[in-house]
Amino acid sequence: MGFWTWMAIAVVLVGSFIAANSVNKKTEKRHVKLLIWFIIGVILFFIWWFTRAR
């Protein structure tokens, strides 16, 4: 895997850690969870895009 794949994985891990340790309202946690799922989707798309056969 390339640099950008590892960078994207690191962003999700850091975002997940921040979301898990936040003490905000439930609605804000919902938004953070949706954001994390969106980032995971983007990461999977980029992994597919950059590893597909040309």
Image (cartoon, rainbow, N blue to C red):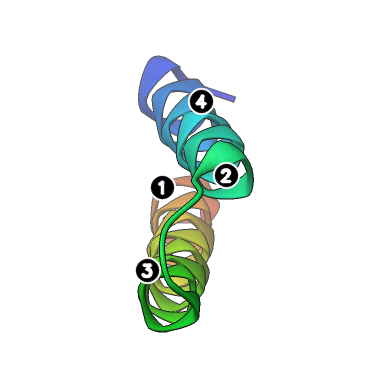
Q: CA distance from mark 4 to mark 3?
A: 15 Å
Q: CA distance from mark 4 to mark 1?
A: 17 Å
Q: Nearer the viewer, residue 51 or 34?
A: 34
Residue shown at 63%/46% (left/top)? 20
Q: Which element carries disc 4, helix, strand or loop?
A: helix
Q: Which element carries disc 2, helix, strand or loop?
A: helix
Q: Nearer the viewer, residue 22 or 12?
A: 22
Q: Earlier in the sequence, mark 2 or mark 4?
A: 4
Label 2: few (<14), some or many (≥20) within 10 Å? some
Q: If the image is split into quadrants, where does the N terminus sit? A: top right
Residue 15 on image: x %, y %? 45, 40
| Three-letter code for the amino acid on which mark 4 is drawn | Ala
Q: Earlier in the sequence, mark 2 or mark 3?
A: 2
Q: Earlier in the sequence, mark 4 or mark 3?
A: 4
* Residue receiving disc 4: 10
Q: CA distance from mark 3 to mark 1?
A: 22 Å
Looking at the image, residue 50 lies above or below residue 6? below
| Three-letter code for the amino acid on which mark 2 is drawn | Ser
* Residue receiving disc 3: 35
Residue 52 on image: x %, y %? 52, 58
Give the left or right position of residue 18, taking residue 1 as reference: left
Q: Which element carries disc 3, helix, strand or loop?
A: helix
* Residue receiving disc 2: 16
Numbered label attached to residue 50:
1
